[in-house]
Structures are given as structure tokens and as C-alpha cells.
Amino acid sequence: MKAHVSSILLGVQDLDRAKQFYVEGLGWKIKNDFGVSVFFESDGASPVGFYDRKGLADQVGTDAEGSGFSGLVLTYVVRSQERVDEIAAEAAKAGATILKPAGALPWGGYGASFADPDGYIWSLGYSAPGADQPYAE
């Protein structure tokens, strides 16, 4: 198995609410809306999609109930501290819960984190330019 993610599917409690948060709040564009799931334009990265939480749990053979930190953090690396601030503000305006306000990080970078309406955690980050930085924008 290669170190590669073909797509990221997140199980959400309310598909309409998730679409509203990401489309209207963060400006994502829908590529495919299948009713039970939705996928967004990926800009060349791994596609991200949402699926009804119970349906996704059934599909992979697990229980849809869960609580607390899942150990999953989605990371979004940008080219400036200002962009971290802008995205954190956009997310907060769209209804995200800011978990860690933008600021200096222990390892020397700059970042913030928020949880979307379903509790998925996004880590926004910036560090000095490097040859292997996985910039999202």
C-alpha cells in the first residue's frame, strides 16, 4: 500500500448543514452531489467528500456513535500568517468553533485550529518556505 489518500470522506450528522458551512462559509465548490454524499472540487489534491454519518458507518462496518477526540486532524498549510488569520476568521463567521486562536506554535510556525459543525478539526498552518511544504494555497 502506498502512502497516498485517494479521497477523504467525512461522516456528517446533517449533510445540508455541512454543505452550507463549506460552500457558503468557506467558499468550496461542489463537484458532485449524489444526495447521500457530496464531493468538492479538489484543486489537484485528494478529493474531500461528505456522507451521511450513519450511512458511512454502515458502509465500513462500524458504529456511527462516537465521541471525543478521534485522533484525526485535517491540516491546511498556507503561504502566510495573514492567510491563517483570514481563514480562521472565515471559519468562525461560518459557525466554526475556534479551538486555538491564531498565534505562534511551539515548533516555530504560526497557526490556528477550528472545529466544523460536526466536530472535525482543521489545523491551519504556516511556516518558513521549504522545498517539501504541502501548500494548499
Image (cartoon, rainbow, N blue to C red):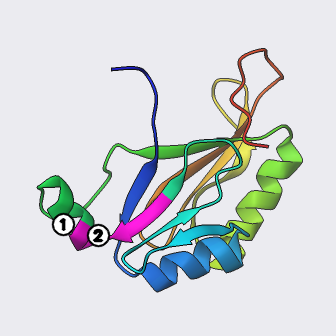
Residue 12 lies left or right of residue 92; in this view the side is: left
Q: Is residue 36 above or below residue 3?
A: below
What amino acid is at disc 2? Arg
Tell me the crowding category of disc 1: few under 14, some 14 to 19, or many 20 or more residues within 10 angstroms, Cα based: some
Residue 60 occupies which quadrant of the picture?
bottom left
What amino acid is at disc 1? Ala
- Residue at 45 percent across and 49 percent down: it is 8
Instruction: Give the mark, 1 or 2, whose residue is nearer the N terminus.
Output: 2
Q: CA distance from mark 1 to mark 2?
A: 6 Å
Camera-nearest residue between 123 and 56: 56
SS assignment at label 2: helix
SS assignment at label 1: loop
Give percent across and percent down for residue 85: 80, 55
Image quarter in which the C terminus is found: top right
Residue 94 lies left or right of residue 67; in this view the side is: right
- Residue at 54 percent across and 69 percent down: it is 32
Callout 1 touching callout 2 (CB < 8 Å): yes
Residue 93 occupies which quadrant of the picture?
bottom right
Camera sees residue 66: no
Give percent across and percent down for residue 6: 46, 39
Camera-nearest residue between 24 and 69: 24
The residue indicated by pointer 2 is: 53
Tell me the crowding category of disc 2: few under 14, some 14 to 19, or many 20 or more residues within 10 angstroms, Cα based: many
Q: Is residue 35 above or below residue 63?
A: below
The residue indicated by pointer 1 is: 64
- Residue at 40 percent across and 55 percent down: it is 9
Q: Which residues are magenta?
A: 49-55
Give percent across and percent down for residue 99: 55, 58
- Disc number for residue 93: none
